[in-house]
Image: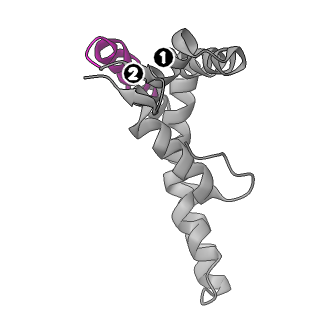
Amino acid sequence: MKRLMEHRWSGHLATIDVIQSNRQEVIVTLETLRDSCPEAELSVMAAGLLTQLMDNKFSFITVFLSLLLHLVEPISRQLQGETIDVHAAVELINAVRAEVQGMRSDEKFQSIIEESNVNIQEQDIQKTAIVLFSLNGENGWQIAN
């Protein structure tokens, strides 16, 4: 899993995208580590991460941040370029500001909540269908058939 970066929007966006696209696999892996890992410290760490990942607030935050960072990332990339001029930069900033202000509505907030709820419901449905992992003494962790 990608580590959250401190300063680059693109790093934050990449982390959020990885979590969203692989959420179910991460959950299953953390559940298995929590329940079956012989190393107590790793088991406790997996349990803590799993608790955070399964929290409804976490789902809401990932949906919100994904929307926000997908708005900000292109301008961030362009502002780091060598060829942008001040006038173009101001136009880009104003366009993103208008988009962010458009996110400050009851309708947009409700759509974020709905998408977050879909993510949560998909977790519960897919948990029973995902193949669990097993510990193979010689080769480490593998997907069980």
Q: Main secondary structure of the magenta part?
A: helix
Say whether residue 100 is visible. Answer: no
Secondary structure of the residue carrying tag 2 is strand
Residue extending farthest to the front is 138
Secondary structure of the residue carrying tag 1 is helix
Determine the residue positioned at 39% across, 24% down.
Answer: 119
Q: Nearer the viewer, residue 17 or 103?
A: 17
Which quarter of the rendered picture does the N terminus lie within?
Answer: top right
What is the tally of numbered marks visible in this picture?
2
Numbered badge on residue 133? 2
Mark 1 vs mark 2: which is more N-terminal? Answer: 1
Other-residue count near label 1 (Cα within 10 Å), few / some / many at <14 / 14–19 / ≥20: some
User: Is 8 rendered above or below residue 26?
Assistant: below
Numbered badge on residue 32? 1
Q: Nearer the viewer, residue 145 or 58?
A: 145
Q: Nearer the viewer, residue 97 or 139?
A: 139
Three-letter amino acid code of the residue under disc 2 = Phe
Determine the residue positioned at 31% across, 22% down.
Answer: 144
Which quarter of the rendered picture does the C terminus lie within?
Answer: top left
State which quadrant residue 93 falls in. bottom right
Mark 1 to mark 2: distance in Å?
Answer: 6 Å
Q: Position of residue 116 (x, y in %)?
A: 44, 25
Determine the residue positioned at 25% across, 16% down.
Answer: 129
The magenta segment is: 112-130
